[in-house]
């Protein structure tokens, strides 16, 4: 049942009560008139005056006259209908009407009637002749004779069974409504002129106050002042009667100082003159939904704003701006961690520290471990500071604020940056804020790391350019020096070789076999030294040579090499597949194959030597192989043989430079070289050339 229906029933009951009292007053006046006439009771009962008869006929409620022992003397039709007894046919006593559970109350009231001469507002149950239980309301008085002696009693009995049922129904409805209100998941606040009159348990839990505490507060006390203007517009419309209801999303302050968002449905309760008696507000906490919406919006905005950006400063400024907007804060700073220097550098800001053209005003640097931001950079764990005045680590940067939230940006287990925001209010940031910023930090960590790497690479490239310029100059000087040194070294070697040759010719008859052998060793050593100088000069000049790249048919190149190289009769060279035409420096390609084939010939100890040359065409490169059945190479030397001066066998032909030249030439072609071999089982050298 609605409140309006309850009010209608209540007004109907009030009207009926007033009518009954008026009827009772008339009856009492007539009874007193009869008493003052001094007529005897018998004459009173027998005489049916038109006046009393009129009263009987006009009373809608039951009317009863009884003697002082409770025997009914006279009743009207309404009483006959109510009690079920017809005095014309049977006698009855009012005791017969008493409901057993109400007997004590009935007898006590009757004693009061005998003592005081009257009782009013007697309400109890009666049992009728048909055993029906009815609720009645009775006003009664004693009838006196001329001697002022009580001779009888009279009363008006009103059947209030239906009213009682309605009242019980209303009471039950109110009880159920109270249960609903108290158990509602929505906060319910009853206000009058802005003052909080009543709240349910849900509202008390939302706000963190006890009911008594809230009853001493106003709506303004628990609302944020920033939301007042919007609320005022609706309240003014409600006061003017323009609206009876409005819905608004606003923020409330809890007892502990924290904030939550709520959808508030406000309804006006008006009196008969349309004036506002109360306002009922239904408060639904929507902080979670609002947070989710804001989080999604913020994450989308950040993702869009940094998409495609590679400059670390641009990325950081976008992050700072979007986080400040989400947190509704006037301050947000992004720090970059420099592990080598052990510092935090401010690279982006929002609020008072943000200058024009993405420049930070009064940029500061923190040591790792210094301040709250430095502490988070050290631990890698985000923090919320509810009151900065109570934290010794707090460092005032732009201005002093009471709340701070700090979150690390982590990539591959290392803190690479810090997100730090402050708010002027105490206890402003929540766990939800912390979780959101941690999620955002994870989102941007990879792109921020890429931007950091790019910045470092750009710095390195700049340094490398300078280094290359110096290296080119050094290489040019080294090449010039190598040619000069090789010429200066070869000249005395040739002179010594000529002198040894002259000595042998002039003294061939005087020298014994041992001396001639020693002179031969000197000639061999001089020859090896000259070859070593030539190889070193070749090795040092490979990178610097700038021969024109051209198409080179390797089949023709190998035929030419077979004529140049000394190939013993016991060694056979086979080309298993037709070789490709490659694009490159022909001289280097000739040196490459010459060294590998020359080594295969030089270190072959078999009666029938075999060298097989083959290749495979891959997608982006050619893979070549030169296989021999010679002495082979132990696996432990496979990584060393390509280093300069690492000769595995003593040989007058070997200088330990040949395979180093091979590797350097292949490196210049952006290829790779490796060997597969076992001692005595021969060796296969593989190398690749980029197409």
Image (tube, helix red, strand yellow):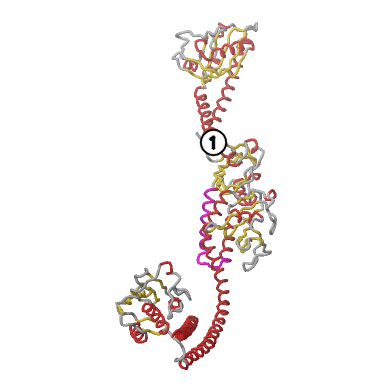
Q: Residue at x 54, y 44 (%)?
A: 284
Q: In the figure, is residue 662 to the left or right of 362? A: left
Nearer to the camera, 383 or 676: 676
Q: Which corner quadrant holds the C terminus?
A: bottom left
Look at the image and say whether residue 290 sits in the magenta stretch: yes
> On screen, 43 above or below 201?
above
Q: Position of residue 438 (x, y in %)?
A: 55, 54
The residue at the point 51 percent across, 87 percent down is: 493
The residue nearer to you, when weighing 521 against 609, is 521
Q: Position of residue 522 (x, y in %)?
A: 48, 84
Please, is residue 272 above or below residue 39 in the view?
Answer: below
Query: Is residue 351 shown left or right of residue 441?
Result: right
Residue 509: x and y in percent read 44, 92
345 lies above or below 571 = above
Residue 362 sits in which quadrant? bottom right
Is the stretch drawn in magenta largely helix, strand or loop?
Answer: helix
Magenta stretch encompasses residue 391: no
Residue 321, image x and y in percent?
59, 61
| Count of picture labels | 1
Classify 10 Å Cα crowding around label 1: few (below 14), some (14-19), many (20 and above): some
Q: Is residue 344 visible?
A: no
**Residue nearest the observer in this picture, 449 or 115:** 449
Mark 1 sits on what residue?
Answer: 181
- Which residue lies at the image location 52% right of the left edge and 51% below the top edge? 292
Q: Which residues are magenta?
A: 288-314
Disc 1 is placed on an element classified as helix
Q: Is residue 215 visible?
A: yes
């Amino acid at each position: 049942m609605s409140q309006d229906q309850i009010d209608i029933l209540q007004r109907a009951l009030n009207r009926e009560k007033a009518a009954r009292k008026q009827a009772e007053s008339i009856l009492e006046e007539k009874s007193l008139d009869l008493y003052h006439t001094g007529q005897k009771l018998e004459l009173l009962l027998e005489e049916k005056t038109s006046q009393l008869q009129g009263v009987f006929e006009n009373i809608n409620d039951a009317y009863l006259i009884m003697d002082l022992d409770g025997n009914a003397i006279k009743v009207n039709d309404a009483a006959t209908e109510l009690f079920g007894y017809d005095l014309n046919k049977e006698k009855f006593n009012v005791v017969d009407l008493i409901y057993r559970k109400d007997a004590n109350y009935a007898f006590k009231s009757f004693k009061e009637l005998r003592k005081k001469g009257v009782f009013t507002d007697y309400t109890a149950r009666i049992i009728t002749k048909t055993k029906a239980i009815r609720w009645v309301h009775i006003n009664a008085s004693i009838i006196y004779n001329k001697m002022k002696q009580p001779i009888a009693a009279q009363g008006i009995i009103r059947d209030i069974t239906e009213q009682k049922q309605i009242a019980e129904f209303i009471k039950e409805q109110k009880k159920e409504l109270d249960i609903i209100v108290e158990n509602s998941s929505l906060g319910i606040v009853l206000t009058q002129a802005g003052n909080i009159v009543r709240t349910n348990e849900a509202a008390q839990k939302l706000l963190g106050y006890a009911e008594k505490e809230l009853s001493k507060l106003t709506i303004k006390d628990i609302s944020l002042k920033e939301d007042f203007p919007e609320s005022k517009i609706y309240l003014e419309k409600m006061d003017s009667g323009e609206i009876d209801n409005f819905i608004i999303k606003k923020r409330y302050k809890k007892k502990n100082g924290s904030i939550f968002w709520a959808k508030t449905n406000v309804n006006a309760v008006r009196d008969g003159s349309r004036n506002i008696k109360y306002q009922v507000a239904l408060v639904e906490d929507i902080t979670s939904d609002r947070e989710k919406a804001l989080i999604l919006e913020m994450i989308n905005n950040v993702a869009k704003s940094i998409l495609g950006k590679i400059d670390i400063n641009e990325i950081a400024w976008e992050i700072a701006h979007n986080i400040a907007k989400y947190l509704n804060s006037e301050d947000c700073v992004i720090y970059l961690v420099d592990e080598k220097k052990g510092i935090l550098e401010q690279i982006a800001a929002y609020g008072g520290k943000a200058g024009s053209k993405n420049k930070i005003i009064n940029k500061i640097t923190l040591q790792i471990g210094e301040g709250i931001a430095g502490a988070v950079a050290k631990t890698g764990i985000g923090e919320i500071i509810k009151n900065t005045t109570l934290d010794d680590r707090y460092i005032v940067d732009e201005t002093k604020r009471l709340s701070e939230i700090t979150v690390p940006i982590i990539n591959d287990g290392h803190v690479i940056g810090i997100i730090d925001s402050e708010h002027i209010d105490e206890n402003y940031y929540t766990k939800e804020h912390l979780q959101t910023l941690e999620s955002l930090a994870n989102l941007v960590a990879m792109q921020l790391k890429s931007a950091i790497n790019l910045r470092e690479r750009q710095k390195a490239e700049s340094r490398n350019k300078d280094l290359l310029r110096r290296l080119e100059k050094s290489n040019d000087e080294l090449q010039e020096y190598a040619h000069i040194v090789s010429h200066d070294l070869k000249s005395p070697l040739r002179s010594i070789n000529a002198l040894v040759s002259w000595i042998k010719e002039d003294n061939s008859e005087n020298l014994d076999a041992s001396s001639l052998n020693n002179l031969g060793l000197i000639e061999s050593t001089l020859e090896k030294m000259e070859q070593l100088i030539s190889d070193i000069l070749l090795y040092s000049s490979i990178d610097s040579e700038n021969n024109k790249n051209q198409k080179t048919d390797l089949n023709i190149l190998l035929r030419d090499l077979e004529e140049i190289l000394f190939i013993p009769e016991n060694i056979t060279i086979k080309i298993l597949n037709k070789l490709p035409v490659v694009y490159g420096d022909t001289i280097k390609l000739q040196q490459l194959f010459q060294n590998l084939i020359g080594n295969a010939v030089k270190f072959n100890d078999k009666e029938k030597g075999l060298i097989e040359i083959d290749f495979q065409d891959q997608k982006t490169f050619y893979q070549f192989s030169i296989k021999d059945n010679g002495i082979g190479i132990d696996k432990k030397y496979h990584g060393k043989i390509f280093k300069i001066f690492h000769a595995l066998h003593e040989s007058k032909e070997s200088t330990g430079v040949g395979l180093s030249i091979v590797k350097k030439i292949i490196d210049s072609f952006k290829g790779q070289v490796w060997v597969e071999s076992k001692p005595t089982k021969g060796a296969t050298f593989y190398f690749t050339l980029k197409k």
